[in-house]
Amino acid sequence: MEYMPKDKTAVPPPTEYLPQHIGIIMDGNGRWAKARGLAREYGHRRGSEVFMDIARYCKKIGIRYLTVYAFSTENWRRPPEEVSGIMDLFREYLREAEEREQENAQKGLRIRYIGEREGLADDILELVDELERGSADKVRTTVNIAINYGGRNEILSACKRLAEQCARGERTPESLTEQDISDNLYTAGQPDPDLIIRPSGEFRLSNFLIWQAAYSEFIYSDILWPDYTEQDFDAALEEYAHRSRRFGGV
Ligand code: FPP
């Protein structure tokens, strides 16, 4: 049934019209900082606070999966102090998440890392592993944090794994299906994103969830990520609720 509009104030649409999985490309931190005469790192810090607010909000309103793009495999090309600033924010977040593991588990929040392990510092990998070991009994919201992530590389790794299975004679190339690729991505077992949000006026996917986003709805906006609010998020949910998804049908 079609979702009937209401005014544009900030209230999320009813649960049945909410996306199950939302991806967010957290963009515009650098410009936000520059506009204030601050170093880019301040933009990332504010951006990570906004991420935490939106993640909490997703749990509150019952979004089942949230995937945020925090650092791509290409982002290593940025100045070393900016890279280490982002890694420190990730570290801080993981430490805090680890301290709150019990509480998060009780509240049904699960945090997952998605990305290439190679290249990440050992202490970050340890924190990621500790977090992966903990599990909520009844997961309400899973937050995937994409760090050192690249969609093409993710697909390539899946293909290599399947090719190895074929080489060992466990599979035949003819038997391989799209589902086999999905099952070998970091997001295995999770629904594909229904909605991808990219703020800050950019109109690119930038190698984010490129396999999984085949049928995702896209919502772009001019707001820089550090300025993004629950109201902006609600407006995106509202717009999503009005779109009709046909998955190639009529
Ligand atoms: C893109 O904006 C943003 C990033 C490359 C980093 C995003 C990282 C965070 C929000 C913090 C990560 C921490 C946690 C806890 C997940 P940009 O720098 O490209 O902005 P610009 O386009 O304005 O230059």
Image (cartoon, rainbow, N blue to C red):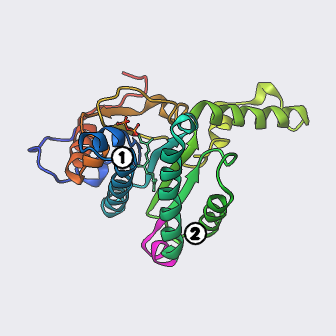
Mark 1: few/some/many CA within 10 Å (<14, 14-19, 20+): some
Amino acid type at circle 2 is Ser
Q: Residue furthest left?
A: 7
Q: Quadrant of the C terminus?
A: top left
Marks 2/1 in contact by CB < 8 Å: the verdict is no
How far across and how far down the image is residue 62, in percent?
Answer: 35, 59
Mark 2: few/some/many CA within 10 Å (<14, 14-19, 20+): some
Q: Splitting the image into 4 quarters, where does residue 197 fall? A: top left
Residue 191 visible in the snapshot: no
Q: Does residue 174 lie above or below 114 as drawn?
A: above
Q: Main secondary structure of the magenta part?
A: helix
User: Where does label 1 land, which residue?
Assistant: 39
Q: Quarter containing ligand 1?
A: top left
Q: Splitting the image into 4 quarters, where does residue 49 fall? A: bottom left
In magenta, the rendered stretch is 102-109
Q: Residue furthest right?
A: 168
How far across and how far down the image is residue 198, in percent?
Answer: 35, 36
Residue plotted at (23% across, 38% down): 239
- Closest to the camera, between mark 2 and mark 1, is 1
Q: CA distance from mark 2 to mark 1?
A: 37 Å
Magenta segment includes 198: no
User: Where does label 2 land, which residue?
Assistant: 135
Question: Which residue occupies the foreground of this view, 187 or 156?
Answer: 156
Question: Which residue occupies the foreground of this view, 34 or 185?
Answer: 34
User: Mark 2 falls on what kind of element?
Assistant: loop
How far across and how far down the image is residue 149, in percent?
Answer: 57, 41
**Residue 123's disc number:** none
Question: Which residue occupies the foreground of this view, 246 or 119?
Answer: 119
Q: Does residue 61 lie above or below 184 as drawn?
A: below
Residue plotted at (58% across, 37% down): 73
